[in-house]
Image (cartoon, rainbow, N blue to C red):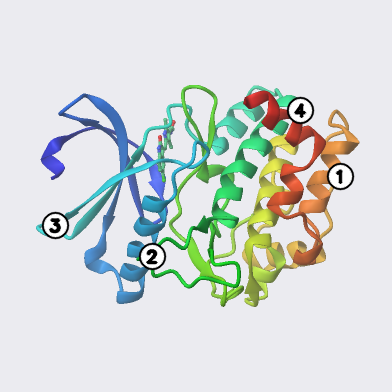
């Protein structure tokens, strides 16, 4: 129950609710919970919430924010999703601080962030549930249940850092499970800076839409602003669909510039997959160093 936890402070807003820093009374462990008021939610939003919790519960990876528990408090129609505390905050904060100090993020740090988000995203996009007896997943020809998870709202504010400089994908508030027979899904969510052309066209999106958003994040770490900016959603949508953006600052290598441009290809099938990103020399080198 909520009484097991002491609220320490408000630390931000996640999708659909506020995020608070909490202390678990049994062992003083510092965690966070995202508080959501389901009383005003439509049936569809409640289903989306159940889906987020189920996705989080099954995703265990060092580069994904760890889910611990959830509490449903019917007395006030609240659900509390209890997750790992990331004392380094989110990348949006890091970018703001760097810009304010007229500083820049070193290229090596950007490659390390790309490597870690790629590992977390690989876990989402290439997740295979073994077809164990009693597992009712729909096995495909190889007998494994291919179930990919699309985050669908990757942005600097959803990438968190723990106390050891580890980067973690968080806030799966809009995530979707896609099993093998629904390779694409149709939906409409707001138009943030990081939305791909195919999502703006309200047409198909797939895991390559997450790769587009990752390209926007890496671009912003280097340029300290998103690749596409505008005064309103309509002109932002036009800019994203024209696909023209300035090169990242000259201090960064052609190798990094090529990877960012590759992730920002208008045509989703021309973008790298998580496998392509894992095999990049600068990424695979850092994965080996990590081991
Ligand atoms: C100024 N805010 C912060 O420094 C900050 C810190 C130290 N942690 C966070 C946020 C989270 C955090 O620490 N763990 C989280 C798990 C899920 C979600 Cl949606 C958010 C968080 C934030 C926004």
**Mark 4 Cβ and ligand 1 under 8 Å apart:** no
The mark that comes first in sequence, 4 or 1, is 4
| Residue 177 image position (x, y, % from top left) | 48, 65
The answer to whether residue 57 is left or right of residue 105 is: left
User: What SS does tag 4 mark?
Assistant: helix
**Based on the displayed image, in which of its 4 quarters is residue 173 positioned?**
bottom left
The reply to whether discs 3 and 2 touch (Cβ–Cβ < 8 Å) is no
Find residue 135 and name its label.
2
**Mark 3 Cβ and ligand 1 under 8 Å apart:** no
Which residue lies under the disc numbered 1? 258
Q: Residues within 10 Å of mark 3 (few under 14, many from 20)?
A: few
Rounded to the nearest angstrom, the CA distance separating label 1 from label 3 is: 51 Å
Of badges 3 and 4, nearer the viewer stands 4
Question: Can you see residue 100?
Answer: yes
User: What SS does tag 3 mark?
Assistant: loop
User: What SS does tag 2 mark?
Assistant: loop
Q: Residue at x 21, y 56 (%)?
A: 78
Find residue 36 and name its label.
none
| Residue 205 image position (x, y, % from top left) | 63, 70
The mark that comes first in sequence, 1 or 3, is 3
Q: Quadrant of the N terminus?
A: top left
Find residue 76 and name its label.
3
The answer to whether residue 225 is left or right of residue 125 is: right
The mark that comes first in sequence, 3 or 2, is 3
């Amino acid at each position: 129950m909520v009484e097991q936890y002491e609220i320490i402070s408000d630390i931000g807003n996640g999708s659909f609710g506020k995020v608070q820093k909490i202390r678990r009374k049994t062992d003083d462990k510092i965690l966070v919970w995202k508080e959501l008021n389901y009383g005003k939610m439509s049936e569809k939003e409640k289903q989306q919430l159940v889906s987020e919790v189920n996705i989080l519960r099954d995703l265990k990876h060092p580069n994904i924010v760890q889910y611990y528990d959830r509490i449903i408090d019917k007395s006030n129609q609240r659900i509390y999703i209890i997750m790992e505390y990331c004392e380094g905050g989110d990348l949006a904060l890091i970018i703001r601080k760097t810009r304010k100090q007229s500083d820049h993020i070193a290229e090596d740090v950007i490659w390390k962030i790309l490597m870690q988000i790629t590992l977390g995203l690989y876990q989402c996009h290439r997740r295979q549930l073994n077809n164990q007896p009693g597992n009712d997943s729909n096995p495909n020809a190889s007998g494994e249940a291919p179930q990919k998870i699309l985050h669908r709202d990757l942005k600097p504010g959803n990438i968190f850092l723990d106390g050891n400089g580890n980067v973690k994908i968080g806030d799966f508030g809009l995530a979707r499970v896609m099993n093998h027979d629904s390779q694409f899904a149709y939906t409409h969510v707001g138009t943030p800076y990081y939305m791909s052309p195919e999502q703006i066209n309200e047409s198909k999106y797939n895991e390559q839409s997450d790769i587009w958003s990752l390209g926007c994040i890496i671009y912003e770490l280097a340029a300290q602003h998103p690749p596409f900016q505008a005064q309103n959603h309509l002109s932002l949508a036009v800019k994203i669909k024209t696909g023209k953006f300035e090169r990242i600052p000259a201090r960064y290598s052609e190798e990094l510039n090529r990877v960012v441009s590759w992730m920002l290809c208008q045509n989703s099938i021309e973008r790298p997959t998580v496998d392509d990103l894992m095999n990049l020399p600068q990424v695979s080198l850092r994965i080996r160093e990590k081991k």
